[in-house]
Image (cartoon, helix red, strand yellow):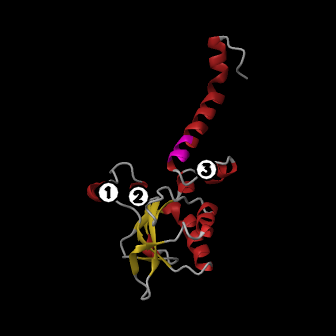
Amino acid sequence: TLVNLGTQGFVNVRNDDILISREAIPYLKGFVKDLESLGYKVIIGYAYRSYEEQANLDAIYQAEAGFSQHQGGLAFDIFLQNETGGVDLTRGLPINQDPRIRDLAHKWGIVHPVPTDTPHYFVLDAAYPGLTKLMQDSGIDVDNYENAKMALLGIAQAYEYQLLSPQVAAVSGSTFLP
């Protein structure tokens, strides 16, 4: 379910029609609060995008429609506020200069999957609760979205293997299965 981010009362938004997945709210709220404790004044510039909006961006940014987390309402673009409290679309969070930002994002299950897209973040744990910590504990770079996809595939395969192993063992006569 999408909700209007501007009515949530914990973060400034670029305009009043920014929507985000309800499931992302607690993660984003914690992240914003922690950023503010570090002295960052932030504003959300973009979140949910329709397929059509994403298709229009594809021509400019090669952001293919149908494959963006923005379309699920789980991605957001966060910027630093300018001196007047507005948004400066050229000033994303300085994640590469301040490692505390990355640590806070991961604490809240949020990843920065595209290094060249400074303002873009994805609430991974809203889609897959606990995946960020699981990947970190396994030494996997959580900011690499391909790693997240591989971790999910591995979890799915392990789950499938556990469920199917007795049947597979019975059919194959294999002795290496538990």
> Residue type at mark 1?
Gln
Please name the residue shown 59% across and 37% down the image. 154
Q: Secondary structure at mark 2?
A: helix
> Residue type at mark 2?
His
How packed mark 3 is, by other alpha carbons closer than 10 Å (few <14, some 14-19, many 20 or more), is: some
| In contact (CB < 8 Å): disc 2 and disc 1 | yes
Residue linked to disc 2? 70
Magenta segment, principal secondary structure?
helix
Q: Does residue 10 lie above or below 123 as drawn?
A: below
Q: Which mark is residue 54?
A: 1
Quarter of the image with the C terminus in it: top right
11 sits left or right of 107 in the view: left
> Residue type at mark 3?
Leu
Quarter of the image with the N terminus in it: bottom left
User: Percent x, y for residue 171?
Assistant: 62, 12
User: Percent x, y for residue 167?
Assistant: 63, 19
Residue linked to disc 3? 131
Disc 2 or 3, which lies upstream in sequence? 2
103 sits left or right of 14 in the view: right
